[in-house]
């Protein structure tokens, strides 16, 4: 039998059980447990993520991924992507969303002339002071809630209204072999035209003398 201990919500539970394949031996390694394995990106580059032996244990079966592993891997994937992709994307720290959505402190709530949106910006402005997020096409925000990780993707944050762009028509390319450009429909104009058509259709059935619909 093996003496096992488990920490749950700040308390420890101790039990005796038969060792099997589901249990792995653990030896206390002291300071070696926090030994630095890698820092990415490496110095002298700024913003490096330091991964230790303790962080590496999070990859074991049955363990929970921590913020270091999440931040490291997202930054690694972006580094391996093509330059055209990295220029269009920005990845926030795993602490960004938590800091953005946390409850107001007593001192923050007492400031009446500052709205909640401004207070939230004050908390996270250090994450955005060196990058114009509205010039990026995609923003990635890792979020941890109830011990579960998921990724929020914000597309085209700087686009506030429909935009017309030119693109190559795939059908023309395949059928004729010629390269030509087609204009995407103006979504706003189409919507306005639809509203005008709807209004004109509804007015056709109105009696001009009585103002009553047929």
Image (spheres, rainbow, N blue to C red):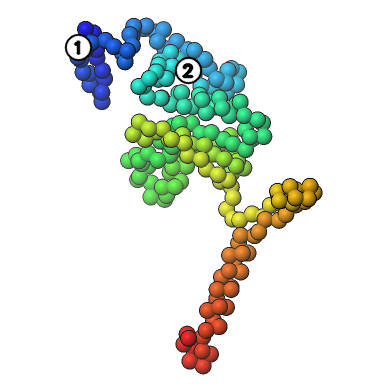
Q: Residue 13's spot in the image, x, y percent? A: 21, 18
Report the disc number at residue 16.
1
Callout 1 crowding tier (Cα within 10 Å): few <14, some 14–19, many ≥20: few
Q: Is residue 107 visible?
A: no
Q: Residue at x 80, y 49 (%)?
A: 178
Q: Residue at x 36, y 7 (%)?
A: 30
Image quarter where the N terminus lies is top left
Determine whether label 1 and label 2 are within 8 Å by CB.
no
Report the disc number at residue 51.
2
Determine whether, in the image, residue 208 is placed left or right of residue 110.
right
In-front residue for pair 126/92? 92
Q: Residue at x 57, y 23 (%)?
A: 46
Q: Residue 187's spot in the image, x, y percent? A: 61, 60
SS class of the residue under badge 1?
A: strand
In the displayed structure, 193 sits above or below 173; it is below
In the displayed structure, 143 sits above or below 169; it is above
Q: Which image quadrant is residue 26 in?
A: top left
Q: CA distance from mark 1 to mark 2?
A: 33 Å
Identify the residue at the far bottom of this view.
Answer: 209
SS class of the residue under badge 2?
A: strand
């Amino acid at each position: 039998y093996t003496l096992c201990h488990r920490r749950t919500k700040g308390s420890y539970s101790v039990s005796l059980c038969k060792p099997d394949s589901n249990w792995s031996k653990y030896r206390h390694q002291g300071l070696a447990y926090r030994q630095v394995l890698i820092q990415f990106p490496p110095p002298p580059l700024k913003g490096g993520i330091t991964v230790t032996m303790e962080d590496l244990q999070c990859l074991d079966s049955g363990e929970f991924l921590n913020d270091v592993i999440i931040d490291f891997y997202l930054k690694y994937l972006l580094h391996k992507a093509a330059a055209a992709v990295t220029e269009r994307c920005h990845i926030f720290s795993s602490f960004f969303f938590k800091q953005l959505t946390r409850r107001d402190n007593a001192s923050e709530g007492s400031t009446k002339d500052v709205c909640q949106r401004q207070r939230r910006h004050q908390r996270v402005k250090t994450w955005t002071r060196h990058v114009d997020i509205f010039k990026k096409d995609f923003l990635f925000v890792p979020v941890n809630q109830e011990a579960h990780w998921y990724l929020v993707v914000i597309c085209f944050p700087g686009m506030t209204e429909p935009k017309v762009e030119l693109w190559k028509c795939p059908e023309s390319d395949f059928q004729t072999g010629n390269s030509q450009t087609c204009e995407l429909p103006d979504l706003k104009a189409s919507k306005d035209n639809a509203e005008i058509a709807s209004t004109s259709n509804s007015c056709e059935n109105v009696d001009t003398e009585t103002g009553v619909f047929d």
